[in-house]
Each structure stands twice: as structure tokens, then as C-alpha cells.
Amino acid sequence: MSSVTDTPRPGDPSDAPPEAPPAGRSRQGVRALLVRLHFYAGVFVAPFLFVAALTGLLYTFTPQLDQLLYGDRLRVEQTGERVLPLSEQIAAARAAHPEGTLTSVLTPAGPEDTTRVELSLPELGEKQRTVFVDPYTAEVKGELTTWFGSTPATTWLDDLHRNLHLGEFGRMYSEVAASWLWVIAAGGLVLWIGRSRGQRAKSARGVLLPDRSARGVRRTRGFHAATGVWLALGLFFLSATGLTWSHYAGERFGRVLDTARAHAPELDTRLPDAPAPDAAAGGDEHAGHSGHDMGEAEAPPADPADFDTALAAARKAGLGGTVTLSPPADTASGWVVAQSDNVWPVHYDRVVVDTTKAEVTAHVRWADHPVLAKLTKLGIQGHMGVLFGIANQIVLALVAIGLMLVIFWGYRMWWQRRPTREDRSGRLGKAPARGTWRQLPLPVLIIGVPAVAALGWALPLLGVTMSSLLLFEVVLV
């Protein structure tokens, strides 16, 4: 949504002359500063937003891409009437791939899906070797190098969207985009809805739809702004959810969760019969719940039969659907079985199972999660396009395409306002009037300065870039 004023152009009578900057301190000074901030933020931040939208659009349809590239491993050719025990499926996977350590097993999400047996190999680092097994015949369908369950194609596109394959340094691009997205969208909404009386829409139609009778930059601005109105809610959502797991702002958000005690409940994996922490070898009174944090002996290789026991105990405890089963890391811990149903209605219950007794020793229910923890989890799933299935993907794709069009129209307005042949000043496009901060009412300055400082603390990259723009504004005056 743009805020630039129109410059009269030869042969385009629909373009009105630019508004004069407000004189003295008044509420119009707020609008003038917002115009200038929106303009420069759009010019300098829009490339980051465009890249984020494009890479996000590519990532949106990774489920379909996975089926296209790896369908022979992800799906079975023919469903059967009886699913074989996990122990038989694991034995088949280990016979084909005896290398590495068995770390987890993911049960099929649907009747046509394969079972995933995940192996840890030192040379793969934080990635895993996932073996795909037909649950009806125990036939090994193939293997892939995965990252937290994501296929190579999904992992590559995820890295492209998050950091452009530039590591931690590259993550700053996506955080800058997410930090500024809501600012630009909110500023554009205010400017479009609160236009000057001569241009203000007389009905909702004038806000939601562009004026097709307009010409030149006004026509472009109408498409730019009206599209932005339709996208606003989605842009706010993507900005907020993207920031929750960003590098700098995400760390601040984590502090808020700590203060509000709003993190997901911790699952105590320690078995009731395990020695007390202070009696364990190498015990530490500050150690956490996991036995391996307290010097416990490393657990022996998992017995495939224990997967069947853990699964049966989890099913008895009410964990339906697809689940991930993870063997204990040490002798003092139990097996962890976690629901992995990401499509609404989600199921995220987790239990700890003592396979020697075939009983559940701890249970964390999704219903017991704090509201903020729930919203964070659901927001991330919605951001990734999996919460509501194909409908979620379509909405995200439309928002991404719409944002790219809004950015295109924004730059087109800048080009349309370039100097005419009679003006050979060499400027690409005319910017709003300078010195707008001098017209801000004193109450706005008194409240606004600490508010911007607080916002800069919460969103560090927004604070740095906004401070640079404000300094740019002051120095140029």
C-alpha cells in the first residue's frame, strides 16, 4: 500500500498536484511522517519481502513436490488388510541398512503411507538416514537423507526461505522482512483508509476495490492499496508467526514465554524406579529431567520388540493417529511416544513408556498446554502451510502472489513519478517532503520515542533499520 503523493504529469489530468507539507505541529505531521516512513521502507525493504514471498511460495507446495519426487518411497503401491508389527518392519529396515543407530520410528500417517525408520550416522551431523518400509509387507521402499523428517527437496527449499543458504548470516534477511512486514502493511492501511477528504473513499467499495476509471499513478496506487487491504490479515499473521522462531526477535519472544510461564509443559522422561539424581553417577542437583543430563549409563541399542510394546502402551493411553517413537537415551529414561498429527484438529499428546512393565509413566496432553504455547505452535504450523491441508496451502500461495504484486505496483508508482523530460535532475522517483518529524505534536514525540525504543528491543533488526531511516530523515533536513 503506497502513500506517495501524486506528481502532475503531461497528458494525465487525473493526477493531482502534490500536497504541501503541513505547517507547524499538528496531527497532519503524523500522517506526513508515516508517508515518508512507508515510502522509504517500501523502497529499501521491499526486495527482502519479495524474496521472502517468492521463496515462501515455492515452499508452500513442498508436500506435492515430495510426492512427485519421492512418491515411490513415501507411498505404498497396494494397501493390505493387516499392518505388520513394528518389530518386523524395523528388522527389515536394519537388514537393508545396518549402519548407524536407530533413533526413532514414525508410524504411517495414512493407509497409503510408509513407515519411517530413522537412523543416526555421525557423518550426517544433525540429519538422519530415513528408511521407508511398506507396513503391510515389510518391503524396504528406499531411503533418504532427511532433516527432522523433511525430505531433501523440502529441506533445500526451507533453507532457501529461511536463510538463502547463507547460514546464520542469511537468517537476517528473513527477520528483516518479517519485522517490517507488519509495519508497512499497517502504515499502508492507515494511509489508504485515512486519505485526504478529496480522495477519501465514500464507501467500503472505495477501500476494497481500485478505481478502474483512474489513470496513471492513481490507477496503480488503487491496485496496490486495495490488494494490500485484502492481504492485510494474512500479512500480519505471517509477520507474527515468522518472528516467533527468528534469531533475534525469537529470542526475545522466548523471554516473554519464560516470564509468562507459557512454554509447553515439559515431559519428565525419568522412570519412577530410576535412582534419585543425587545418587546417580555424576549426578548434578542442577541437572534436568533427562537421565543423560545426570551422568546415567548410555542405553543399549533398542530392541525392535520394545517398539511394539511402547506403541501398544501409547495406544492404550489414548494416543491415536500417527506417532513418533523414540528409544531412551540412557538407562534412567523411558521411551517417548509423541503424536505427530499436524492437520487440524491437531493431536500433540506425548507419553513416556516403561517397556519393562508396558505402562505409561508420564503423560503431557495437548489440552494442558498454555494458550500462548498453543497459539505459537498452531501459528507455526499455519505459517508452514500444513495446519488446514490444501486449503492452508492455497491461502498462503495467494498471499505470497498478492504480496509480490503489491511490491511490483509499489515500484511501478515510483517509476511513474519519475521526472519528466523537462526535469533532467536525474532522480528516479520523487520522494515525499522531508522534515516531517518537525511537524509531529509534542505528545506524539513524548509517547513515540520510548515506544519505538521498546519496539526496537523486542524486534532488534527492526530497531536497527528503523533507527537508520529516522537518522536519515533527521540528517537530510
Image (cartoon, rainbow, N blue to C red):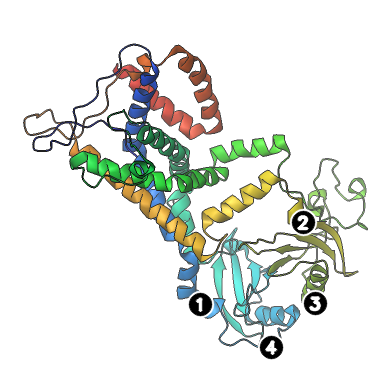
Residue pointed to by mark 3: 305
Marks 1 and 2, Cα distance to the nearest angstrom? 33 Å
Residue type at the position of mark 4: Glu
Q: Are marks 4 and 2 in contact (CB under 8 Å)?
A: no
Q: Compared with residue 339, is residue 9 higher up or lower down, i.e. above or below?
A: above
Residue pointed to by mark 4: 81
Q: Quadrant of the N terminus?
A: top left
Residue type at the position of mark 2: Arg
User: Badge 4: how crowded within 10 Å, few (<14), some, or many (20+)?
Assistant: few
Residue type at the position of mark 3: Ala
Q: Residue at 86% of width from left, 58% of height from top?
A: 332
Q: Compared with residue 471, is residue 397 higher up or lower down, i.e. above or below?
A: below
Looking at the rendering, which quadrant does residue 202 occupy? top left
Q: Residue at 35% of width from left, 45% of height from top?
A: 205
Q: Which mark is residue 365?
A: 2
Residue pointed to by mark 1: 71
For mark 1, give the secondary structure: helix
Q: Nearer the viewer, mark 4 or mark 3?
A: 4
